[in-house]
């Protein structure tokens, strides 16, 4: 399931982080900070996540699974768009 950035919330980022999807959580916090740079709690949460990510030698298994699901969903959407254009 690919999430649209319009659906990103701090709660969603926190839940992803709690479940071990650190890179997805960081992505959401970065997106939110672009749109709400005054929110110090988002900056602190992102800083904490980035420290945890820096300690990891490679993406976690959960992060890899999330990336692969997002990649597969994107491919399916592109194939669907291509089919619709031909029709």
Image (tube, helix red, strand yellow):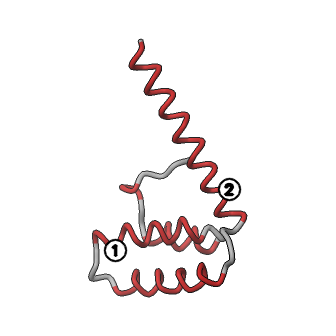
> Upstream in the sequence, badge 1 or badge 2?
1
Q: Where residue 33 is drawn, which disc sits there?
A: 1
Report the residue that reaches farthest toward the top. Answer: 87
Residue 86: quadrant of the picture: top left
Query: In the image shown, does 58 or 42 lie closer to the viewer?
Result: 58
Name the residue located 54 percent from the left edge and 65 percent from the top edge: 24
Residue 48 screen position, x and y as percent: 52, 86
Relative vertical location of residue 40 with respect to residue 63 in this rendering, above or below: below
Residue 38 screen position, x and y as percent: 27, 82
Name the residue located 56 percent from the left edge and 86 percent from the top edge: 51
Secondary structure state at the residue bearing disc 1 = helix
Relative vertical location of residue 80 with respect to residue 65 in this rendering, above or below: above
Whether residue 29 sits left or right of residue 57 in the image: it is: left
Q: Where residue 65 is drawn, which disc sits there?
A: 2
What separation in Å lies between label 1 and label 2 (alpha carbons)? 25 Å
Residue 34: quadrant of the picture: bottom left
Whether residue 7 sits left or right of residue 73 in the image: it is: left
């Amino acid at each position: 399931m690919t999430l649209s950035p319009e659906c990103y919330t701090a709660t969603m980022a926190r839940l992803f982080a709690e479940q071990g999807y650190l890179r997805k959580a960081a992505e959401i916090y970065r997106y939110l900070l672009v749109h709400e740079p005054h929110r110090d709690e988002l900056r602190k949460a992102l800083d904490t996540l980035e420290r945890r990510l820096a300690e990891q030698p490679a993406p976690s298994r959960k992060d890899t699974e999330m990336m692969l699901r997002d990649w597969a969903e994107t491919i399916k959407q592109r194939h669907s768009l291509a089919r619709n254009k031909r029709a």
